[in-house]
Amino acid sequence: MKKIGIITLNGYHNYGNRLQNYALQTTLERMGFVADTLVGKDNNQVKKQNVSYMNRILKIMKQPLSNTMESVNRKIKNIIYKNRINLREEIFKDFSDKYINECSYMITNDAIPEGMAEEYNFFIVGSDQVWNPHYKKGSPIEFLTFAPKHKRISYAASFGISEIPEEYKRIYTNYLSEMNHISVREDAGADIVRSLTGREAEVVLDPTLLLSKEEWMEIAETDPDKPKNGYILTYFLGEIPKDRKGFINRISKEHNLEVINLAQLREKTPYLTGPSEFIDYINSAQLFLTDSFHGVAFSLMLETPFIVFDREGNSPSMNSRIDTILNTFNMQSRYFNNFTDESELFDVDYSNIKAVLKKEQERAKQYLVKALQ
């Protein structure tokens, strides 16, 4: 049986990252391949990544200190939050251990296991922001330079930006030119590939949309703390701005719905929700509010009413992936800024979703079949 090595981001704190990894692996296995995920960083890099994530989250809690007692309380609170972050990471690692075939070894630019390039028939990089230079700093691993050119394939790879910084253009041009097959996740990514290499990259579905609702519900789990009655679910990658909190609280009171805020560090129980529970939470929500690409993807797959917001502090180019998925499924009206009638918040017309999804899934499958011949 042919083997495929997957290169993706290997963090243990983001729902979309873990679930897209599982989805790509499952899709390849369904096609008759053995799929392993290669961890493309060393322990020092893992530590740096986790420290960076922790510092970003803890920055939320920093405020001027007025006296010694407040300083002590702040330090105690930070210890609690650090423990909470570590516990969440363990929950995500448990999901990976259960569902993702991660190799026990790690690869770096300077340490590629001998014979690895020959062990696998193909290597696929993707999905997620594997080509974002601000994350990977032009690392050649994510462009599969350790493998023969005919084995290099990308699936729904994302740059996360609309233009490559000047300092990375030369090496990105070389790396992309040597890829055998290129597909990306958003239109802005295809524009980058075209501008750097003159090649046409296919824009394909994120792996999470290649699996059916029934397949996702097979690995979904119900959080014992999930409300018994209706609720509004939120998933924002950062602290929720005050104006959005006001909107959420007003809608909650008007419709008598509890609010569950996933990924908010201050709220212990929701913060410790794992990827399997994430699926179930979205599936059962009366309304889902998010600024996450994968939040939108799962809303579409599970046919849950949703509203998507621009990410706070991000440049417009960062929204390209959400623009692409909304345009593909003709759901631009679900952008918060496009709402003119709040009576439509809970009313989404999903009648055409299945037809579009089937068409896009078939196109994605054809790309993979061609690339993996």
Image (cartoon, rainbow, N blue to C red):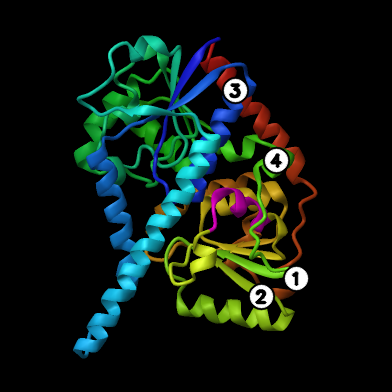
Query: Which of the two discs, 3 and 2, labels the residue nearer the N terminus?
Result: 3
Using the rendered view, name the quadrant where residue 312 is placed.
bottom left
> Which residue is tagged 3?
29
Using the rendered view, name the quadrant where residue 137 is placed.
top left
Q: What amino acid type is highlighted by mark number 4?
A: Glu
Q: What amino acid type is highlighted by mark number 1?
A: Asn
Q: CA distance from mark 4 to mark 1?
A: 23 Å
> Which residue is tagged 4?
218
Query: Which disc number belongs to residue 229?
Result: 1
Query: Which disc number belongs to residue 114?
Result: none
Q: Position of residue 309 (x, y in %)?
A: 53, 64
Q: CA distance from mark 2 to mark 1?
A: 8 Å
Range covered by the magenta-colored residues: 273-282
Look at the numbered discs 4 and 2 and tell me whether their residues touch, using CB distance below 8 Å.
no
Q: Residue furthest right?
A: 351
Q: For this rendering, which residue is in front, 357 or 103?
A: 103
| Residue drawn where x is 39% and y is 44% of the image | 11
Q: Secondary structure at mark 3?
A: helix
Q: What amino acid type is highlighted by mark number 3?
A: Glu
Look at the numbered discs 3 and 4 and tell me whether their residues touch, using CB distance below 8 Å.
no
Q: What amino acid type is highlighted by mark number 2?
A: Glu
Q: For this rendering, which residue is in front, 143 or 275?
A: 275
Q: CA distance from mark 4 to mark 2?
A: 26 Å
Using the rendered view, name the quadrant where residue 331 is placed.
bottom right
> Which residue is tagged 2?
258
